[in-house]
Amino acid sequence: MSPFEVVTLGNGDAFTERRFNTSFLLRCDGALLAIDCPDRYRAVLKSASEKSGLALRIEEIDDLILTHLHGDHVNGLEAVGFLKALVLKKRLRLWTTPEVAEEIWERRLVASMGRLWDGTAFQSRRLEDYFDLRVLEWDRPNSIGPFEASLRRTIHHIPTCALCVRAGGRTWGYSCDTAWDPSLIEWLSSADLIDHETNHGPAHTAYKHLAALPQDLRSRMRLVHVPDGFDEDAANISVAAEGTARPV
Ligand SMILES: [Zn+2]
């Protein structure tokens, strides 16, 4: 049995009313690596804990990869940053692309996190007060504990990375948000387990493209970022169920 497993915390899209937004928690030899940080993150962890029987707690998560700045992937980061830095006194190591690193503070978080009232005066705060920012490299594997994360640009509205993460001799591939991209499929195809998005619109992948892939590939693939109306029973690729831990 592989020591590397992926917990699907959510499999929904940005508009869902019945799922959590798509995010994951990777586990290997006791180490954890979170992928993206949606709203109500502690509730997301609690729900997955109850479904999986695993104790998944924010206190134990020290490393998080942020794939891009759309809200359904990043909205939980403000509360997690406050909780980790101010309450738990331990900054989250926030791993992301150079493009996201460039924008995340000045164009996303500063409005709500840049100033704190200490009871007497306003105190200015910087990104470094909350997060230990680590910039990932595009062109080589990035070591994060037992995980080796390789990145690839996707076709999406804003800079977004797909991932191949290797640990325990196995590889997990994640398309992240992307338009249909056969070259990305090729890049992901050597992974032992592949989570691929599907949704509507020009910046997402229509299900019909994935359904036409060879059986060998589909058998290693699960769907995430699915719209609420997606007909799971009619699909020839399974949706990655929320709150399940799958061996990679
Ligand atoms: Zn997106």
Image (cartoon, helix red, strand yellow):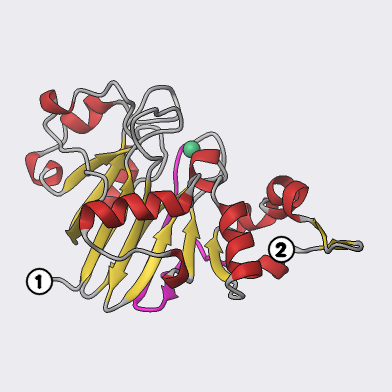
Instruction: For ligand 1, tell me if the residue under mark 1 lies within 8 Å.
Output: no
Drawn side of residue 55 relative to residue 156, left or right: left
Residue name at image x 40 percent, y 65 percent:
57
Looking at the image, which is closer to me, 111 or 118? Answer: 118
- Identify residue for label 2: 127
- Whether 67 is drawn above or below 145: the answer is above
Sequence-wise first label, 1 or 2: 1
Q: Specify the quadrant of the image occupied by residue 149.
A: bottom left
Q: Position of residue 13 (x, y in %)?
A: 40, 33
Drawn side of residue 61 relative to residue 78, left or right: left
The magenta segment: 135-155
Q: Residue furthest front?
A: 119
Residue 43 visible in image: yes
Residue name at image x 29 percent, y 42 percent:
196
Tell me how far mark 1 sits from mark 2, CA to CA.
Answer: 40 Å
Label 1 with label 2: CB-CB less than 8 Å = no
Q: Quadrant of the C terminus?
A: bottom left
Q: Residue furthest right?
A: 121
- Whether 194 is drawn above or below 211: the answer is below
Q: Amino acid at mark 2?
A: Leu
Q: Amino acid at mark 1?
A: Met
